[in-house]
Image (cartoon, helix red, strand yellow):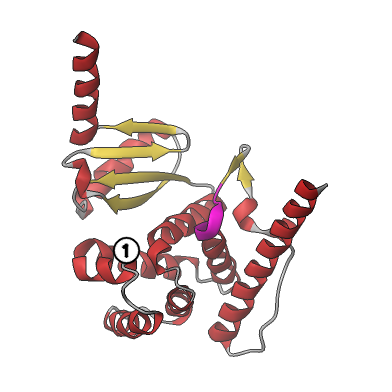
Amino acid sequence: MLEGGGFAKRRAGARRFRIEILNFLKGLHDGSRPRCRGSWGHQRALHVAGGQTIVTGMAGRYANALFELALEAKALDRVMSELDTFAALLDESADLRRLVRSPVFSAGEQARALAAILKRAEISGLTANFLGLVTRNRRLFAVREMIEDYKALAAAHRGETTAEVTSAEALDEEEMKALKTAIKEAMGTDVVIAAKVDERLIGGLIVKVGSRQIDTSLRGKLNNLQIALKEVG
C-alpha cells in the first residue's frame, strides 16, 4: 500500500513538474498567460519506439518540455540549430564548461554570464528562454544531456535513428559527414548524430545506436588489453 502510494505521489510530482516548465516557457515564448496543454499520458518523453523509451529522468523531462513547445511553434529545426551552437561552444570553451558544471557559481552569476554568451552567439527566443530557466533552476550542469535528449525526441518524431557519438576531440564537418554516411549505410535508415567530446578516450570513437555500441577508442582498446593480459597471467 505504501509502495503504491509512493508511486502515485512521484507520478503526480512529475506531472506538476512538466506543467510548470511548459507554462513558464510558454509564457516567456509568446507573452501570453501561461497555460498547460495535454496530459501525462501524452508526454513525449514516455513515447516508445519499438518498445524502447526515448528519454527518461530529469534531463528527459526538460528536453520533453522544450520539444513540445518547439513542435507547437513549428521551430524544431531552429531550436535544434541553436542547441547545436551552444553544444559547440561547450566543446570549444573550458571556461564555459566550468561555468556550467561548477557549483561555485551562483544561479545569478551563471545567468548573467549565460545571457552575454547567448547574445554573442545569436541564440534567442525559445532556446534562450529554456537555457535561462535551466540556469535559474540550478540544472545547467545537465544541459548537454538535455540537448541530446531533445535531439533524440526530434529524430524519433521524424522517423530517424539517433546515433550517440563520443570522440576524444570534436569532429570536423567532413568527419561528421563521413560518419553519418557510414552509420546510415549500416542501419539502413536516416541518422541524426548526437556528438559529444570526452578527452579521456585519448583517441578514436564510441558509437551507440539504441542498445548497440561500438567502441574504437584508444582507452577502450587499452582496457581490453589490460583484461587480456590479466587472463594470460
Q: Looking at this view, name the residue that lies furthest to the front.
A: 2
Q: What is the crowding at mark 1: few (fewer than 14 residues within 10 Å), some, or many (at least 20)?
A: some
Please tell me whether residue 59 belongs to the stretch shown in magenta: yes
Image position, residue 119 (x, y; %): 31, 84
Question: In the rendered image of this protein, does residue 220 appear above or below residue 231?
Answer: below
Identity of the residue drawn at 40% across and 43% down: 163
Relative to residue 102, is residue 126 drawn left or right? right
| Residue visible at 40% across and 79% down in the picture | 107
Which quadrant of the structure image shows residue 43? bottom right
Is residue 165 part of the magenta span, yes or no? no
Residue 186 located left or right of residue 134: left
Disc 1 on helix, strand or loop? helix
Q: Quadrant of the C terminus?
A: top left
Nearest the eye: 160 or 216: 216
Give the residue at x 19% y 22%: 225
Can see residue 50? Answer: yes
Residue 8: quarter of image: bottom right
Left or right, 135 with reference to 72: left
Does residue 59 lie above or below 164 as drawn?
below
Q: x and y percent of residue 57 in the render?
A: 55, 54
Residue in the image at 57% along x and 74% along y: 73
Q: Is residue 163 above or below residue 115?
A: above
Q: Is residue 93 visible?
A: no
x then y, percent, for residue 131: 43, 74
Tally the numbered discs: 1
Residue 171 image position (x, y, % from top left): 21, 51
Residue at mark 1? 87
Part of the protein shown in magenta: 54-60
The residue at the far top in this view is 232
Amino acid at circle 1: Ala
